[in-house]
Amino acid sequence: MTDPLVRLMTEQDRVAVMELLAGSDPWKRLGYQVKDWDSYFLPLPQGRDSYVIEENGTVAGIAVVRRKFLLGDYLELFGVAGWARGKGLGGRLLTHIETLVFARAQNLFACVSDFNEQGRHFYEKQGYQEIGPIQNLLIQDSAEILLRKTSGPARISKK
């Protein structure tokens, strides 16, 4: 047994990441299949920072960050394999991302599906606040909820 490792995603991780996403919720409920992820990950997401967490050499989670979004960065994609949930791996991966983001910006944004109670609880536990819903963004009659975690305002007012 080795400690979980967070590292940059490589081309060799592509298939494992696509299978991880296609085999877990909320992506299954949203109708994503392996073929849908093919164009996103081939080539690896351009202009984004992509990380995986692995446990015992197996990819257990993925995080993709888009820089420069609303005076911060946007966690464009975050997923943890079903078998890896409840082990603290998602929290470890998110903490790694936050450390990087908050070294350069004050805000990290993410979205979570309104039906994804497990995801909503996870982000709330990590200190994210719900900003508001974006109706019918991915599927009809569902909303993606914009979330924000902040280290403070982008500017300090002078009184």
Image (tube, rainbow, N blue to C red):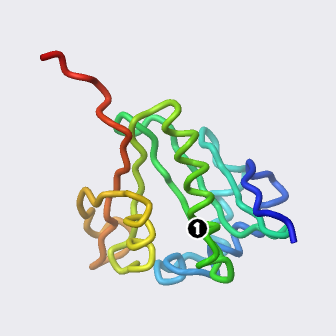
The quarter of the picture where residue 135 lies is bottom left
Query: Nearest the camera: 32 or 144?
Result: 144
- Please name the residue that numbered disc 1 is placed on: 79
Outermost top residue:
158
Q: Residue at x 70, y 58 (%)?
A: 52
x and y, in percent, of residue 155 in the image: 28, 24
Quadrant housing the C terminus: top left
Which quadrant of the rendered structure holds the N terminus? bottom right
Kindly identify the residue that appears in the image at 64 percent across and 67 percent down. 89
Apparent side of residue 156 relative to residue 27 in the rendered image (left or right): left
Q: Position of residue 49 (x, y in %)?
A: 63, 43
- For this rendering, which residue is in front, 141 or 148? 148
Query: How many residues crowd around disc 1 within 10 Å: few (fewer than 14), some, or many (20 or more)?
Result: many
Q: Label 1 amino acid?
A: Gly
Q: Quadrant of residue 138?
A: bottom left
Left or right, 26 with respect to 33, comes to left
Secondary structure, mark 1, is: strand
Query: Can you say whether 159 is above or below 149 in the image?
Result: above
Is residue 93 shown above or below 138?
Answer: above
Please give the name of the residue rendered at 42% of the width and 55% of the height, measured from the top-left corner.
Answer: 110
Q: Position of residue 82 (x, y in %)?
A: 63, 81
Lateral position of residue 50 relative to residue 99, left or right: right
Name the residue rendered at 39%, 60% in the picture: 111
